[in-house]
Image (cartoon, coloured by chain):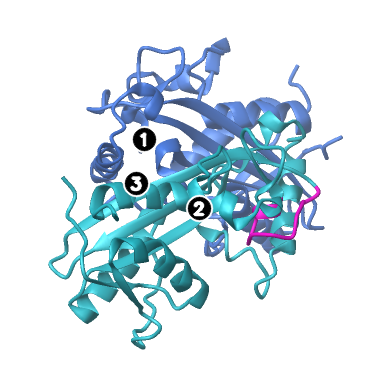
Chain colours: A cyan, B blue
Amino acid sequence: MARQLTGKLVVATHNPGKLKEMRELLAPYGVEAVSAGELNLPAPAETGHMFSENAAIKAHAAARATGLPAFADDSGICVEALDGAPGLFSADWAEAGDFGPAMERVERELRRRGASEPEQRRAHFVSALILAWPDCHEELFEGRAFGAMVWPPRGAGGFGYDPMFLPDGSERTFGELSAEEKHGLHGSRGAALSHRARAFVKLAEACLKSPG
Amino acid sequence: MARQLTGKLVVATHNPGKLKEMRELLAPYGVEAVSAGELNLPAPAETGHMFSENAAIKAHAAARATGLPAFADDSGICVEALDGAPGLFSADWAEAGDFGPAMERVERELRRRGASEPEQRRAHFVSALILAWPDCHEELFEGRAFGAMVWPPRGAGGFGYDPMFLPDGSERTFGELSAEEKHGLHGSRGAALSHRARAFVKLAEACLKSPG
């Protein structure tokens, strides 16, 4: 059985948006979240070879520094015809936070390989969540959303490669879906559920005491 | 149409085994191969985010340094349940050239994710070949071999993760196959054909004048 999480948790992020999302997700379980950014913890170098490894680097660093359980996530998009690229480098392909050039690069590489049909353009988003404790114990939860890369990108919502990703079973890209639909809030549990929501559902089932 | 290759070619490798293999493959086409190692060219840093990008870095560096067309390859194994890992880091997971610990690491990560059935242990080898010319033109050829990761590893042949990789349509791992079977020499063109052989067949059909 997975170790249970209660009380206070460090969210190993310097991103206020991610912290806000985690606070909302954790509030019903009575878990209080404080972030690495708020505690002025340094951000460790993400030198891992897998998403789970980068999440573990961040979570263990925060747990060691604070003596509290810590949470971190790492995520990206893996395109099959590109052998998993951009993968760990998903954010690096953006230019100053602009993912337009990153999506163009994916499209250019797909065309170079003659990948025009949806089945040649398969991809998945992945989110790896790590809960780490000061005694080095860790729990891993991964969520994936499968679909295909479309061109041109569609929708102004979401983040990163969202406008280029058409999840299986949906006629709208992640960029065209609402946050509620993607995150599975308010009871929605559709095919378009995001990779992060899928991972968090696993974490909550394993490590958090059911609210109510 | 792809640019044709004639005359002399620099093989961007410092590995005598790879050079020998390329010499044998190219000899029937009247192409003479000299290696970056023989020419004392420095090995550039492989900082790419895709196999094809690392091959291009090596090939263009050799073409620029010599004024001759140059060839380079980059290859690795991508495990689906690990989102493409070890991928670009396939060689890095070995310890001082020993792939035993690398295969154990793959197995440990698969077990951690509960991947026990063959369909949960899908993987592919990929080889990206780049031909580059001094005027910066390049041609890309990729070959992939699909299969599943087995445990324990079987066979003493091959290299790297070969003993752990069971190609689709074969009852023997790459480690149990002869070089002739893997490389498709002497007319063998079976399901067990290696990723590198598949890529070279494409290169030869596109860029080399048929022998005889």
Q: Amino acid at mark 2?
A: Leu
Task: Tell me the tag on residue A185.
Answer: 2
Which residue corresponds to the image point at 81% horizontal and 37% vertical from the top-left? B4
The answer to which of marks 2 and 3 sits earlier in the sequence is: 2
- Discs 2 and 3 lie in a common subunit: yes
Mark 3 residue type: Lys
Please give the chain letter of the residue carrying mark 2: A
Mark 2 residue element: helix
At label 2, counting other C-alpha atoms closer than 10 Å, the crowd grade (few under 14, some 14-19, many 20 or more) is few
**What is the quadrant of residue A37 in the picture?**
bottom left
Horizontal relation, residue B192 to residue A28: left or right? right
Query: Percent x, y for residue A3?
Result: 17, 54
B76 over A24 or under it: above or below = above
Q: Amino acid at mark 1?
A: Phe
The answer to whether marks 2 and 3 mark residues whose Cβ atoms lie closer than 8 Å is no
Tell me which segment is drawn in magenta. Answer: A152-163
Task: Answer few, some or many: residues within 10 Å of disc 1's Cα (few below 14, many 20 plus, some between 14 and 19).
Answer: few
In this picture, residue B42 sits left or right of residue A14: right
Q: Is residue B114 left or right of residue B186?
A: left
Foreground pick, A211 / A20: A211
Task: Choose between B71 and B105: the one closer to the eye.
Answer: B105
Spot occupied by residue A156 in the image (x, y as percentages of width and height): 74, 60
Q: Residue furthest bottom?
A: A40
Q: Nearer the viewer, mark 1 or mark 2?
A: 2
- Dominant secondary structure of the residues highlighted in magenta in the image: loop
